[in-house]
Image: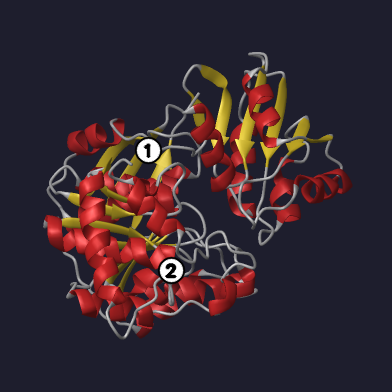
Amino acid sequence: MNSFTRVEEYLNSLINYEVTFPLGGSRGRPKLAPVYAACERLGLLLAPPKCLHIAGTVGKGSTAAFAQALLSVRHNVLSFTSPHLVSPKERVRLNGSDLSGEVWNEGIDVLRAECARAPKIDLTYFETTFVFYLWCAQRLGTTAHVVETGLGGSFDATNVLKRTTAILTRIHLDHTDILGKTIAEIARDKSGIIKQGCICFSAEQHLDALPVVTEAASAKDAVLYYEGRDFRAIRDPDNVVRFSFDEHDANLLLPVSGEFQRHNLAVAAAAALNLDRSLTELEMNRALSDLKLQARQQELSGYPNIMIDVCHNPASFDALADSLNHEQDFSRRIAVVAMMRDKDARASLGHLLHVVDELWVTDAPTPRSFSREELGLIATEMGFATRVIERGSAYAELLSLPPDTRGVLCGSFYLVGDFLKRFHDA
């Protein structure tokens, strides 16, 4: 048994609301008490230095990656993200690299022993990995921190953090059964990460979200920096982002595909510069050039016609469709899709209608997934040229598409992660 297998087996024994359906499972709405109790038991600090706390509907992972890369110029940066694609090690990283199995074993052993003492503290998979993150911050003495929320903001396990800089990426409809039925309600929940007297950076928001974010910042006496007003990023055809914030002006090379990524880079760069004003344009570009952002409109190595993307809600499908519509190099487009049953499949897939020539529908390896037959029926009713296909066959045929056909694998972290596990990034 390798040094990390024991950790994986323990994590997999825990309740995991990321894969439970209905989402949230039997414990009801998210709550902070278990994480507070565990942190008190372990003596963990809830205010790690230079901590960026990120919430939003789309772009959280990309924003976290950009922020981590930029802050790593001057600091040892510990980042927390979710879900993972291939290994839980992806969730807690030091300067963008996995921690050793030995560190994971040490931290999880301490956590298990303390939480098992009476009165017992029961943590979920997500809560356990986040408490481990806070243990690492203390154990490793890291000097800057990037934390992505899991679900929402107000009652997400990460919201035990104190004295953070809040970052809000773009807010849209998603997880409506838990966070609210309207953009305004969802914005209210996600704005719960804004702490008293903190600084908050917000990407451009929907008209229904902006007043909620503004009101939440005002109620907490927080300073709100808003994209397009206080900082901005304009992308030119050469993929250069002309960024400005306060006295800083820089031409930043966007290291990933997608027009939407300029919003994520803008809010990450502004927040990073606010923490470290000494960052230069040259240093920022060097850091960004080394960044490898997996499964965000990523072309597979050796397969330039194959793209993988973890888009999983209407807003992120819209961004994918926009990128595909701007491509000129392919005569046909085929998308392999799986989706979770708690997602709005019709609104999401609707963005691909008349964009792809065929939709190959499959399932993802989680109880939350639509069956391929269920999703196939939805796609057919919407007017797609639909093919229902077993997952392994879909992967193999995707990699066999001719060079003039764009193949896209999308719709779920779990689908893309399963593909990468099987084919190791092809």
Given the image, on which type of amino acid does mark 1 rest?
A: Val
Residue 50 picture quarter: bottom left
Residue at image location 26% in from the left, 52% down from the top: 104
Q: Are marks 2 and 1 in contact (CB under 8 Å)?
A: no
Q: Residue at x 66, y 59 (%)?
A: 343
Distance CA(mark 2)–CA(mark 1): 40 Å
Q: Is residue 422 above or below residue 338?
A: above
- Kindly identify which numbered label has been placed on residue 241: 1
Q: Which mark is residue 321?
A: none
Picture coordinates of residue 93, whole percent (x, y): 28, 48
Up-down relation of residue 164 to residue 324 (above or below): below
Tell whether 102 sits left or right of 12. left
Against 350, residue 188 (above or below) is: below
Q: Position of residue 56 (x, y in %)?
A: 47, 62
Q: Residues within 10 Å of mark 1 (few under 14, many from 20)?
A: many
- Residue 376 % position (x, y): 81, 44
Q: Amino acid at mark 2?
A: Thr
Instruction: Give the residue at mark 2.
Output: 124
Left or right: 245 as drawn, with respect to 312? left
The quadrant the N terminus occupies is top left
Q: Can see residue 203?
A: no
Q: Nearer the viewer, mark 2 or mark 1?
A: 2
What residue is rendered at 44% in x and 80% in y?
Answer: 31
Q: Is 393 placed left or right of 50 in the picture?
A: right
Mark 2 neighbour class, 10 Å CA radius: few under 14, some 14 to 19, many 20 or more: some
